[in-house]
Image (cartoon, rainbow, N blue to C red):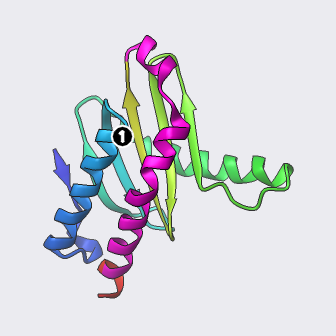
Amino acid sequence: MVCCTGCYGLHPSATEQIAAQVREVKNIFPGTNFVVILEPDGKIVFEEVSAGIEQGFVGMVAALKRAALQFGNTLGQKECPVIHVKGSRNIFSYYDVGEHLLAFFTEMPGPMLEMFDTHAADNSMGPVVQNLMRLLTNAVTG
């Protein structure tokens, strides 16, 4: 199910273009079954959900972002634009997209996950993040 919240002023053509970028995320991170784009205040701009994902996911994203920033501050880092948290069969990822936040949950079989190269995936995500940043900026200002 794809849901793009219309109350945040996204034009249908912007929704389609954002959905196309989400498909790219799924190509880079096979097994992705939940994607959300949040505004700085935590409001959902775009959400694509598969069955079985908890509704509390957005709150966990915000909590992880705060924790990462606090941890980074202790190490002298002022920002944390990308985070991956790997479990035994899943990866939670988030990327800063300008003022917005792209977060997604990916499930993979253990051996595939062990071999998955997040650095290479981050390199592949560069154009996706840039495209989303442009789309979201235009969707809000245009």
- Whether residue 67 sits left or right of residue 34 in the image: it is right
- Whether residue 15 sits left or right of residue 89 in the image: it is left
Q: Residues within 10 Å of mark 1 (few under 14, many from 20)?
A: some
Name the residue at 15% across, 72% down: 13
Q: Is residue 51 above or below residue 1?
A: above
Within the image, what quadrant is residue 134 found in?
Answer: bottom left
Quadrant for the C terminus in the image: bottom left
| Residue 50: x %, y % from top left | 23, 36
| Residue 40: x %, y % from top left | 51, 68
Residue placed furthest toward the bottom: 142
* Residue with the mark numbered 1: 28
Quadrant for the N terminus in the image: top left
- Whether residue 28 sits left or right of residue 99 in the image: it is left
- Viewer-closest of 45 and 80: 80
Name the residue at 51% across, 18% down: 114
- Viewer-closest of 69 and 113: 113
Within the image, what quadrant is residue 79 found in?
Answer: bottom right
Name the residue at 44% across, 11% down: 111
Q: Name which residue type carries label 1.
A: Ile
Name the residue at 47% across, 26% down: 116
- Whether residue 72 sits left or right of residue 56 in the image: it is right
> Magenta: predominant secondary structure element?
helix
Does 134 lie within the magenta span? yes
Does 137 lie within the magenta span? yes
Q: Is residue 107 above or below residue 131?
A: above
| Residue 135: x %, y % from top left | 32, 72
> How many numbered circles are shown?
1
Q: Please report the bounds of the magenta region as a residue range.
A: 109-138
Q: Is residue 130 above or below residue 107?
A: below
